[in-house]
Amino acid sequence: MRNIHPYTTESFTPLNQSRKMELELSGGTIDAEAITEDHIFYADDGRAEAAITTISYLRTDDGNPQRPVMFLWNGGPGSATSMLQLECFGPYCISKDAEEKPVYGLETTPDTILDICDLVYVDPVGVGYSRLLKDEAAADYFSVEGDARSITFAMVNWLKRHHRWNSPIYLCGESYGTIRACRVLEELSRDPIFGNRMMLGLPVAGVILIGSAISANDGMQVIEPALELVTAALPSMTAVNWYHNHPRDCSLEAFAAEAWEFGRTRLVPALFAGDECSKEEIREIAAKLSEYTGMDASYFEQNRLHLRDINDFMVQVISQKQLRVDLYDGRVTSALTGAYNAVGDGNMPLSVMNGLLAEVLGLDEKRMYFTGNLNVYPGWSYVVENGKTHMECLKDAAARMPEMKIMMASGLYDLCTLAGNTRYQFSHSGITPGRVLMKEYPGGHGVYSSKEGKAAFLKDVRDLIGKK
């Protein structure tokens, strides 16, 4: 039985397809080339055991053979880069209707950063067009270490193949992809201490982290151990409550900032006091938490100011409308009763990737593009050989490369990777203050899930790359 792709109708033929294109962007027309290619890994016996596929968009008319290049990936583990490609950076994005819901269509993204930076979408083994070709090799790819190492060597192979050794390198990861980015930084270093290092010593110009999952060193804990869930979730719960219930006549940013200050100055000391906190103070703080979150004050009184599970908020905040909010974007709602599916039932990106975009890329139908494959997850190993946390990898990279820019992007409506946790995480990271550009956007787990969030995010990325 094949564990990763239990059923298949395809045989493996290496991909190496290019297609020239002309793109109308906000700054004018550019010439570009799209290249879809495999980076194949071989076992000791010479047989191919895995392939990582990259989809690259390269500008061809600016006369700069060493222009910046960004390597991008999503998370999971087991998610492909289709979200970052079709909903954010482009240059082709999925069409949307008047209500901003995805529909079967493909449009040029006029605000793509392709005019200043080439884009390389990297799909880990087992998702996208990437494949595990020998089941017995699964352990070498489905782990924190194996995933990062294989991604790194696919990147190196790409640089070698395209003669881009002197291009400024940027990394962009989302969700679990933030963990991957930190471990790739470690792989790119020149470390003589730990084994299986090829001492690459390749510099990185910048790293962009979207929806930080860096706290998840064991794959389970999504918030920092020293931080209570209610505190980590407070800015996001406040934002979702503001969006649906409009409890105050003020801006989203002002309401969230007020809640965070309340959490820092009143809630945290009360949680620290524990049983020594008086009933009167608990009642007073619970009332304020109710105002910020839209939940019943009695919930916080009964639980002594703790939030037991984020799902408690999701089902309470607009229960008066017989609705619940979504984990990945608290603006999205579904019926309060009945089954809840956090990833939804529709998958328009799957259709667009295998249909319209495959045609644009000049690909035939011999290989399926999987937007997700959670078969890789059950056996995933979070053990790391050097004992470093993901944040320590990022901190060490920042120390090695003082010119490397770091941007952390959070969605205020994201109830999965919480903005409050990210604030706390980076304020305790040990990275020199001011090195990390901390940004929050009116979006969900993908900060680009709203028009305003996407526009602001891409502008900030463009500014990051443009800064000298």
Image (cartoon, rainbow, N blue to C red):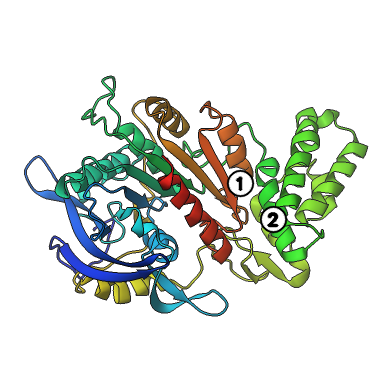
Q: Label 2 sits on what residue type?
A: Ala
- Locate residue 179, reporting x and y percent: 42, 41
Dot 1: few (<14), some (14–19), or many (≥20) neighbours within 10 Å?
A: many
Q: Evaluate whether residue 69 shows in this view.
A: yes
Residue 440 vertical position relative to residue 149 in the rendered view, above or below: below
Nearest the viewer among 111 and 3 is: 111
Nearest the viewer among 458 and 154 is: 458
Name the secondary structure under disc 1: helix
**Residue identified by numbered label 2:** 239
Residue 141: mark in rendering: none
| Left or right position of 43 against 117 | left
Marks 1 and 2 sit apart, C-alpha to C-alpha, by 10 Å
Q: Which residue is drawn at 44% across and 61% down?
A: 88
- Locate residue 407, reporting x and y percent: 49, 42
1 and 2 marks in contact (CB < 8 Å): yes
Q: Label 1 sits on what residue type?
A: Ala
Q: Residue at x 67, y 59 (%)?
A: 314
Q: Quadrant of residue 360?
A: bottom left
**Residue identified by numbered label 1:** 419
Dot 2: few (<14), some (14–19), or many (≥20) neighbours within 10 Å?
A: many
Q: Which residue is drawn at 40% across and 64% down?
A: 27
- Locate residue 45, reporting x and y percent: 6, 42
Quadrant holding the N terminus: bottom left
Name the secondary structure under disc 2: helix
- N-terminal label among 1 and 2: 2
